[in-house]
């Protein structure tokens, strides 16, 4: 086994995509998912710290799963609040978006059913599909022709798995077209709203609520560790869907519940955003400014390509693991925290800088980023 481990590690090193943890200097943030800057907000930190813990018995941890000792009135009340924000009958809190997606996709589809997932779906959605007893098939990213071809061949209950905003390309799903096809073939849609939570919709309710299309989905997953700046996630859906997950969603049943501090943090984060919703406008203004500057200086240069994105995620594709790592290093040296995304995380030949734009980035920082990109390529 040791030889096997060493061999696999050496393969990674030889291909130039070996991963390791680093603790570097504090640089200008163009890498994190903290799109609204809430994770760094001192004001929000103070609000979270001001919650009343006097009646809380388990102040440091939850002491068990939600079905045993880990449930609390605060958690149940927060779920009611989240259901209201996301315009759903009910909500169920999970420890992370990963476990929430895994629970939904692995438990609801059954043997004889068909799962059709977008080829660029996050790995947790794919793993949920693989863990289920249903047949799982990918369709070409955002291709309605390929989706309909596979819908036409699908058997049993059909589940279409998508994201509102995709984490590597920063593009959006063609929601209306997918809903139309799902209705035609009587398919159920499950959507991951990880990268739209907080940054879109009233009070951070995400893209689907912004479009008033929430009733078209069997389940919607919202993550709080990105735009909301805290931790945890929830699934929104009908009362029956939530009851089903409580009974059959293994990542929910067998996981120690979030501690009370995390519950208060989620509650405080949504309250804070409701009172500082202008952060959304500032963020989208920064995204527009980045795209404006980029378009003024680049189209395609030296093999570099930036797909269109009007979201926080701005990929700059420059093929080759070693090339993109060296490019990212130049940004780091210049004080800009930009990281490379290597294959096999993305398809070989599409290695990239994954630039994240935030509400807390200044115009000068964005100009400096573009200037460094001009000088580096």
Image: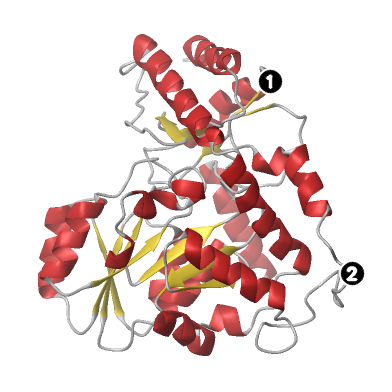
**157 sits left or right of 341 in the view:** left
Residue occupying the point 65% across, 66% down: 3
Q: Is residue 148 visible?
A: yes
Vertical side of 136 occupied by 31: above or below: above
Label 2: few (<14), some (14–19) or many (≥20) C-alpha neighbours in 10 Å? few
Q: Where is the N terminus found, in terms of image quarters?
A: bottom right
- Which residue is labeled 1 in the image? 335
Give the residue at the far right of this rendering: 54
Vertical side of 144 occupied by 319: above or below: above
The percent coordinates of residue 151 (x first, y second) are 15, 69
Check whether the beta carbons of the residues at disc 2 and disc 1 lie within 8 A of each other.
no
Q: Secondary structure at mark 2?
A: loop
Q: Give the quarter of the image for residue 54.
A: bottom right
Which comes before the other along the chain, label 2 or label 1? 2
Residue 25 vs residue 103, the one in the foreground: 103
The percent coordinates of residue 28 (x first, y second) are 67, 25
Q: Give the quarter of the image for residue 291.
A: top left
Q: How is the image coloured?
A: secondary structure
**91 sits left or right of 266 in the view:** left
């Amino acid at each position: 086994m040791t030889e096997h481990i060493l061999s696999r590690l050496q393969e990674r090193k030889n291909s130039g995509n070996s991963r390791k943890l680093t603790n570097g200097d504090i640089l200008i943030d163009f890498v994190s998912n903290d799109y609204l800057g809430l994770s760094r907000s001192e004001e929000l930190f103070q609000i979270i710290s001001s919650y009343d813990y006097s009646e809380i018995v388990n102040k440091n941890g939850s002491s068990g799963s939600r079905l045993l000792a880990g449930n609390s009135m605060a958690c149940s009340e927060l779920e009611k609040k989240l259901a209201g924000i996301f315009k759903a009958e009910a909500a169920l809190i999970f420890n992370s978006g990963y476990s929430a997606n895994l629970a939904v996709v692995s438990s609801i589809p059954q043997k004889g059913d068909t799962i059709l997932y977008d080829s660029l779906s996050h790995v947790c959605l794919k793993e949920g599909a693989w863990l289920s007893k249903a047949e799982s098939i990918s369709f070409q990213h955002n291709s309605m022709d390929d989706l309909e071809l596979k819908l036409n061949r699908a058997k049993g209950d059909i589940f279409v798995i998508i994201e509102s905003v995709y984490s590597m390309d920063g593009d959006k799903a063609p929601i209306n077209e997918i809903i139309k096809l799902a209705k035609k073939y009587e398919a159920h849609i499950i959507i991951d709203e990880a990268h739209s939570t907080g940054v879109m919709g009233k009070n951070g309710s995400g893209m689907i609520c912004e479009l008033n299309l929430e009733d078209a989905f069997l389940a919607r997953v919202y993550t709080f560790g990105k735009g909301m700046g805290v931790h945890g996630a929830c699934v929104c859906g009908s009362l029956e869907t939530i009851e089903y997950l409580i009974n059959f969603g293994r990542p929910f049943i067998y996981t120690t519940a979030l501690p009370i501090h995390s519950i208060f943090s989620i509650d405080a984060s949504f309250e804070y955003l409701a009172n500082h919703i202008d952060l959304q406008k500032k963020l989208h203004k920064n995204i527009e400014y980045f795209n404006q500057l980029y378009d003024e200086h680049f189209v395609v240069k030296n093999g570099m390509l930036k797909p269109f994105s009007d979201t926080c995620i701005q990929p700059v594709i420059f093929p080759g693991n070693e090339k993109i790592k060296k490019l990212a290093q130049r940004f780091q040296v210049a004080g800009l925290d930009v990281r490379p995304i290597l294959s096999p995380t993305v398809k070989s030949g599409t290695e990239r800088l994954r630039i994240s734009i935030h509400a807390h980035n200044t115009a000068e920082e964005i100009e400096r980023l573009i200037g460094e990109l001009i000088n580096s390529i």
